[in-house]
Image (cartoon, rainbow, N blue to C red):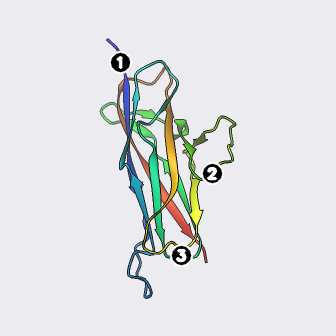
Amino acid sequence: MKSFLACTFLVCAIALSCSSVWAQYEPFAVEVDPQEVSFIIDGPPGMYGAALPLNVSVSSGFSEWSLHCQASPMVEVANGWIIPSSRIFMDGGFQDILEDGDGLLALDQPVLVGQGTFTGPEFTLVSVLGLRVQSEWNDRPGTYTGQLTFTYLAGP
């Protein structure tokens, strides 16, 4: 019988909720699609991609902004087994300069996924992220869950 890991990220989008006199909408909001990203690891250790890419869209009332993404570790809750966020990667997206030379950026630290200017109330697609997880021999079969957090910085 074949054993496998099933990994799921619940995507959390952080949006500013403050009032604005000139706007009838949130000054900054993030939409992600899909809301859940899954990996099926049913083979030997290696790099496994998510079933679908993650589309990230922004609505901004700010003149300048940047958006960053970071992953939490994935945890198999019943036993406490962990896949560290240093083995969760993104390819594609906004940041084209690759730090490790293989086209992937680890999400254990915030990674720039978009930046821009005022969009108004309409959402604008800023990144399409391919997410990947690196499995190793010592990873045990189970269902692991984690979270992606998007954080933005508004400029003057």
Q: Can you identify the residue that label 1 sits on?
A: 3
User: Residue 62, labelled with which disc?
Assistant: 3
Relative image position of residue 47 (x, y in whole percent) = 52, 28
Q: Nearer the viewer, residue 33 or 149?
A: 33
- For marks 1 and 3, the one nearer the N-term is 1
Tell me the distance, in whole angstroms, between the alpha carbons under discs 2 and 1: 35 Å
User: Residue 95, labelled with which disc?
Assistant: 2
Q: Looking at the rendering, in which quadrant would you find the C terminus?
A: bottom right
Dot 1 amino acid type: Ser
Tell me the distance, in whole angstroms, between the alpha carbons under discs 1 and 3: 49 Å
For the residue labelled by badge 1, is the local secondary structure a helix, a strand or a loop?
loop
| Residue at the top extreme, as displayed | 1
Which quarter of the figure has residue 105? top right
Name the residue located 41 percent from the left edge and 54 percent from the top edge.
Answer: 32
Dot 3 amino acid type: Phe
For the residue labelled by badge 2, is the local secondary structure a helix, a strand or a loop?
loop
**Is 128 positioned to the left or the right of 25 in the image?**
right
Relative image position of residue 155 (x, y in whole percent) = 60, 73
User: Residue 83, labelled with which disc?
Assistant: none
